[in-house]
């Protein structure tokens, strides 16, 4: 039986199977995978952001877009860790999601959609800049990319929250 810990579409669910039917190592394996990949993602995103801050000569527009993507990925990885490490503490006594669980779900949902949109924005930026040969047009489009990449995820998460 599946039991959902969070309230939106990024629920961290667990299988309610007795210990006799499932070894502890098999139950823990998904948690270990999430913790490992999230820690590596946090490390990678942090290094990208720090390298942008430390070395001023690398601060091109395309690199700035990569930093925005890294910020989204940093939030996604961090709150995936929160979801796994919170475990059963993310549920209230009556089995409903706690405030921590709801915040984790909202931030993970938002940052995942924003990460996808920033990846698409980087592709569009590079296409306009390199293939079309219009770096000026690409730089001018950055303000529109900001609006779409930060606002659309908020609308999507807001719609998901209003449905609950």
Image: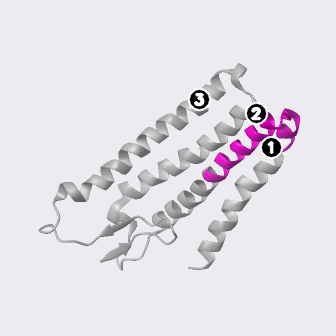
Report the magenta residues as a range.
116-141
Mark 2 in CB contact with mark 1 (< 8 angstroms): yes
Q: Is residue 10 above or below residue 45?
A: below
The one nearer the camera, 85 or 38, is 38
Question: Alpha carbon of mark 3 to alpha carbon of mark 2: how far?
Answer: 16 Å
Report how many numbered discs are placed on residues in the image.
3
**Helix, strand or loop: magenta stretch:** helix
Q: Earlier in the sequence, mark 3 or mark 2?
A: 3
| Left or right: 62 in relation to 82 | right
Is tag 3's residue or tag 1's residue first in the polypeptide sequence? Answer: 3
**What's the colour scheme?**
one colour
The single residue placed furthest to the front in the displayed view is 131
Q: Which residue is mark 1?
A: 142
Q: Which mark is residue 50?
A: 3
- From mark 2 to mark 1, how far is it between C-alphas? 8 Å
Report x, y in % for residue 61.
76, 33
Q: Position of residue 128 (x, y in %)?
A: 80, 40
Q: Residue at x 56, y 58 (%)?
A: 107
Question: For the residue labelled by badge 3, is the local secondary structure a helix, a strand or a loop?
Answer: helix
Q: Residues within 10 Å of mark 3 (few under 14, many from 20)?
A: few
Q: Secondary structure at mark 2?
A: helix
Give the mark, 2 or 1, whose residue is nearer the N terminus: 2
Residue in the picture at 82% in, 50% down: 144
Front-most of residues 104 and 137: 137
Residue under circle 2? 61
Residue beneath the point at 64% across and 46% down: 119
- Give the quarter of the image for residue 47: top right
Q: Is residue 108 left or right of residue 29?
A: right
Quadrant of the snapshot with the N terminus: bottom left
Alpha carbon separation for disc pair 3 and 1: 22 Å
């Amino acid at each position: 039986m599946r039991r959902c810990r969070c309230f939106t579409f990024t629920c961290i669910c667990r299988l309610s199977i007795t210990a006799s039917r499932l070894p502890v190592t098999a139950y823990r394996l998904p948690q270990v995978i999430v913790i490992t990949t999230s820690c590596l993602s946090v490390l990678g995103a942090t290094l990208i952001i720090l390298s942008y801050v430390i070395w001023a000569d690398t601060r091109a527009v395309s690199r700035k877009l990569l930093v925005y993507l890294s910020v989204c990925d940093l939030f996604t990885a961090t709150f995936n860790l929160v979801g796994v490490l919170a475990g059963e503490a993310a549920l209230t006594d009556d089995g409903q999601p706690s405030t921590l669980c709801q915040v984790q779900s909202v931030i993970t949902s938002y940052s995942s959609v924003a990460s996808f949109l920033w990846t698409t924005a980087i592709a569009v930026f590079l296409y306009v800049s390199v293939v079309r040969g219009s770096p000026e047009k690409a730089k001018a489009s950055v303000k529109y990319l900001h609006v779409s990449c930060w606002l659309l995820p908020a609308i999507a998460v807001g719609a998901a929250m209003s449905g609950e």
